[in-house]
Image: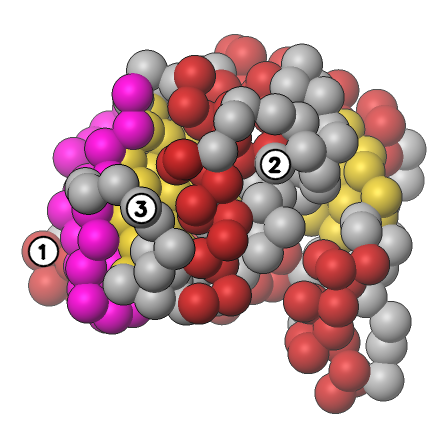
């Protein structure tokens, strides 16, 4: 079941998303986290809450959706770096509680170990963005709905979307990533998806009003029992139903 909330702008998306996730900021909870521009505002809200209310992350675990293959941890554009700069460095969470897939060494083995850790620590709420082609995590169109954490080739459209981060470094976007699979994401007890901007409108329409089909990976969320989708008006401009 999907609950949809359409708000005015990105700031409102972030504030409403925090209202959802704050119920899970308690000892023993396991958070599934995401990178990209969509969740940054939510992370700012989490930092503000930690600073003002002293929310304690000492006994909270986190698992990130994905990581590029081949980037060192301290690379400027690694998702490990992204998460530390945008959240972890500011909420006093123990490094041992933080889990990001490793894109170095035997990546296939890393993916299997990551899946096993998630099975050992089931995710209470999984935060997602959505790609313009409907991907969640780095599960590109055509990914099996049965997929677990795996190595995936990134499509040209996804690499184009992310080129703005690598162009200033004079580097190419990596061609592969290690990502939670679609079946992995579906194991989460609750899913929170946030999106903003007209470039996400087609993907949001497919997610909410299209057929459940592997050509649009996010459509699998129609089969999840507890999903909250929070978007701005621009991302919802193509929706035909009232929400």
How far apart are the two marked residues, 1 and 3, measured between alpha carbons? 40 Å
Discs 2/1, front: 2
Quarter of the picture holding the N terminus: top left
Tell us which disc is closer to us: 3 or 2: 3
Pick the residue in front: 204 or 180.
Answer: 204
Q: Using the image as rendered, state which of residue 90 and residue 119 is in the foreground.
A: 119
Q: Quadrant of the C terminus?
A: top left
Position of residue 127 measured from the top left corner of the image (x, y, whole percent): 40, 41
Q: Which span is picked out in magenta?
A: 1-29
Label 1 secondary element:
helix
Is 54 in front, or is 136? 136
* Residue positioned most to the left: 53
- Say which quarter of the image contains residue 150: top right
Mark 3 and mark 2 residues within 8 Å of each other at the beta carbon: no
Q: Which residue is mark 1?
A: 53
* Marker disc for residue 240: 3
**Residue plotted at (69% across, 48% down):** 67
Residue 45 is situated, as x and y percent measured from the top left of the image, at 23, 61
Q: Secondary structure at mark 2?
A: loop
Q: Relative to 86, does residue 239 appear above or below in the rendering? A: above
Using the image as rendered, state which of residue 198 and residue 102 is in the foreground.
198
Query: Which residue of the protein is positioned furthest toward the right in this rendering?
Result: 106
Residue at x-position 34% and y-position 60%: 237
In this figure, which residue is indicated by the disc labeled 2?
216
Image quadrant where residue 94 sits: top left
Residue 170 is left or right of residue 184, and the answer is: right
> Residue 142 at what x, y percent from top left?
75, 31
Mark 1 vs mark 3, foreground winner is: 3
Q: Residue at x 66, y 27 (%)?
A: 214
- 63 lies left or right of 87: right
Side (left or right) of 97 relative to 181: left
> Residue, x 67% and y 67% (percent of image)?
161
């Amino acid at each position: 079941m999907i609950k949809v909330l359409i708000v005015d702008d990105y700031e409102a998306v972030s504030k409403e998303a925090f209202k959802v996730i704050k119920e899970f900021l308690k000892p023993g909870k396991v958070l599934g986290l995401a990178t990209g521009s969509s969740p940054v505002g939510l992370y700012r809200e989490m930092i503000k809450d930690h600073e003002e209310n002293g929310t304690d992350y000492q006994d909270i675990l986190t698992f990130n959706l994905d990581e590029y293959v081949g980037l060192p941890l301290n690379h400027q554009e690694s998702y490990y770096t992204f998460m530390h700069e945008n959240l972890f460095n500011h909420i006093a969470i123990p490094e041992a509680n933080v889990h990001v897939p490793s894109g170095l060494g035997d990546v296939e083995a890393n993916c299997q170990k990551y899946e096993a850790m998630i099975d050992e620590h089931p995710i209470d709420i999984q935060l997602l963005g959505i790609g313009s082609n409907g991907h969640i995590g780095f599960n590109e169109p055509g990914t099996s709905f049965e997929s677990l954490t795996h190595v995936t080739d990134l499509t040209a459209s996804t690499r184009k979307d992310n080129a703005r981060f690598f162009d200033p470094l004079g580097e190419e976007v990596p061609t592969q990533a290690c990502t939670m699979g679609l079946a992995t994401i579906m194991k989460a007890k609750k899913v929170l998806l946030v999106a903003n901007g007209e470039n996400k409108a087609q993907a949001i329409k497919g997610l909410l009003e299209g057929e459940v089909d592997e050509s649009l990976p996010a459509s699998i969320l129609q089969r999840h029992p507890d999903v909250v989708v929070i978007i701005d008006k621009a991302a919802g401009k193509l929706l035909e139903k009232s929400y």
